[in-house]
Image (spheres, rainbow, N blue to C red):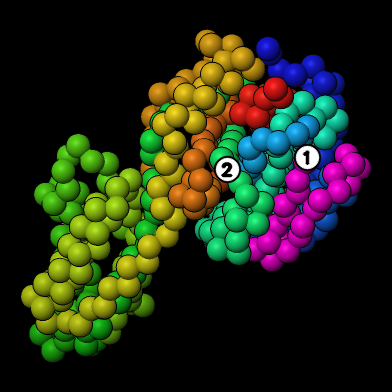
């Protein structure tokens, strides 16, 4: 079964929804106007069980199927990014400093499309739970919704989400069993030295030299402490210090990110980073404090559900456009919190050629909305078939 004809029939509606959301981006958990727009559409579809206020502005709605069956969760994220858009599109952001640079506008439109179809046909048993989540971009809105009891309240048995994929062929669906996206941690190292005149360094305790030593030593975690068979990235992304060429500063700060897939690797990195910071600080005679902040866990697809989802994808787009052994990415995603609670799958739908997500020239490809909506709808119909 290819893209569902009924869903293809309201592709223009999905485009209109998507572009309205794109023009009115909201950040973090302040997605109240987007949520109100979603609720209005759900009510138009005849969906009556709608709950708001999850993670401040999230929306959860239920479509009842025909008879007893499993409860299938479908999730879309709604938040934008604090960036200035340069696409020049007629539907470009109308809000200075905010834009949908990751395609969450498209994800929301695709889930709305699936919701419209499922509410019309109800060609499934059990229930479909529609999850419209705020604050994916670094704030952990998914974690908040889980902690607020969403899974238990709705009795969700399995859960699915999709993300557009720039660079993947338009309409291609890519997924893989096991870890698909990495865990993300952040680190902050504050160094306290003793400043002075740049011409008399012997009278100072230079935090700049200590910072350089620490940064170089951190690189040995990947090359000398980690098993080469286990993926790991340690990136220093900021060194902040100094104010003039002839002044040795008092302090320096180092910031960066760690990406990994396994909990024992995260443990090792945090331990070694603490040891390195302490050792290097002692060797340079400075004080240094490490703040290691664990963020989103790895996004891990259930093995059985991955096989199931790949088979559904083949029905929607054809076997030649399904990659069921996609290469894991070192980026992170807070759908991971939902997958920690329930089996399910995170998949990518190809956005075609164009700017990468988080780039000011990025835009969601409206052509793929019927593909994503059909995939989501068919996941429900195939996971909870009528007897």
Please tell me which residue is depicted at 85% across the width and 44% down the height of the picture: 47
Whether residue 52 is visible to the viewer of this picture, yes or no, is: yes
The picture places residue 260, in percent across and down from the top left corner, at 32, 48
* Picture quadrant where residue 367 is located: top right
Region rendered in magenta: 43-64
Queried whether the magenta region covers residue 137, the answer comes back as no
Spatial CA span between label 2 and label 1: 15 Å
Displayed quadrant of residue 185:
bottom left
Q: In the figure, residue 20 lies in which quadrant?
A: top right
Q: Nearer the viewer, residue 300 or 68?
A: 68
Which residue is labeled 2 in the image?
157
Pointer 1 residue: 64
Density class for disc 2 (Cα within 10 Å; few <14, some 14-19, many ≥20) is some
- As drawn, 293 above or below 231: below
Quarter of the rendering occupied by the N terminus: top right
Counting every numbered tag in the picture gives 2
Q: Which mark is residue 348?
A: none
Q: Nearer the viewer, residue 39 or 193?
A: 39
Q: Along the line of sight, which residue is nearer the eye, 24 or 249?
A: 24
**Is-magenta flag for residue 52?**
yes
Of residues 387 and 45, which is closer to you in this image?
Answer: 387
Let me know if residue 209 appears in the view.
no
Give how far across and how far down residue 101 sits, in percent. 62, 45
How far across and down, in percent of the image, does residue 49 sit?
Answer: 81, 51
Q: Position of residue 64 (x, y in %)?
A: 78, 40
Q: Are marks 2 and 1 in contact (CB under 8 Å)?
A: no
Dot 2 or dot 1, earlier in sequence: 1
Above or below, 364 relative to 192 = above
């Amino acid at each position: 079964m290819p893209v569902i004809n009924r869903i293809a029939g309201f592709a223009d509606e999905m485009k209109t929804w998507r572009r309205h959301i794109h023009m009115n981006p909201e950040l973090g958990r302040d997605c109240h106007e987007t949520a109100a727009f979603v609720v209005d559409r759900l009510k138009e579809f005849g969906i009556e069980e709608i709950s708001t206020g999850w993670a401040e502005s999230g929306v959860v709605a239920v479509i009842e199927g025909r008879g007893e069956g499993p409860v299938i969760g479908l999730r879309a994220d709604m938040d934008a990014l604090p960036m200035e858009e340069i696409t020049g599109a007629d539907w470009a952001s109308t809000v200075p400093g905010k834009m949908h640079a990751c395609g969450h506008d498209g994800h929301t439109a695709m889930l709305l499309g699936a919701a419209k179809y499922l509410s019309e046909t109800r060609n499934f048993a059990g229930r479909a739970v529609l999850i419209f989540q705020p604050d994916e971009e670094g704030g952990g809105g998914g974690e908040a919704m889980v902690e607020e009891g969403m899974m238990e309240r709705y009795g969700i048995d399995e859960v699915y989400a999709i993300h557009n994929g720039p660079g993947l062929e338009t309409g291609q669906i890519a997924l893989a069993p096991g870890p698909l996206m990495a865990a993300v941690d952040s680190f902050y190292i504050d160094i306290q030295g003793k400043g002075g005149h740049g011409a008399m360094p012997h009278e100072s305790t230079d935090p700049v030299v200590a910072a350089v030593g620490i940064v170089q030593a951190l690189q040995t975690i990947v090359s000398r402490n980690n098993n080469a068979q286990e993926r790991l990235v340690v990136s220093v992304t900021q060194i902040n210090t100094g104010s003039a060429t002839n002044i040795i500063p008092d302090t320096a700060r180092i910031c960066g990110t760690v990406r990994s897939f396994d909990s024992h690797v995260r443990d090792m990195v945090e331990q070694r980073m603490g040891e390195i910071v302490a050792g290097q600080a002692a060797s340079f005679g400075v004080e240094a404090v490490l703040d290691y902040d664990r963020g989103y866990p790895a996004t891990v697809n259930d093995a059985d559900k991955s096989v199931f989802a790949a088979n559904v994808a083949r029905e929607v787009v054809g076997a030649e456009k399904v990659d069921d052994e996609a290469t894991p990415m070192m980026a992170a995603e807070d759908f991971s919190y939902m997958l920690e609670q329930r089996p399910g799958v995170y998949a990518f739908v190809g956005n075609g050629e164009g700017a990468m997500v988080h780039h000011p020239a990025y835009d969601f490809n409206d052509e793929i909305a019927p593909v994503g909506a059909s995939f989501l709808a068919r996941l429900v119909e195939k996971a909870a078939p009528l007897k």
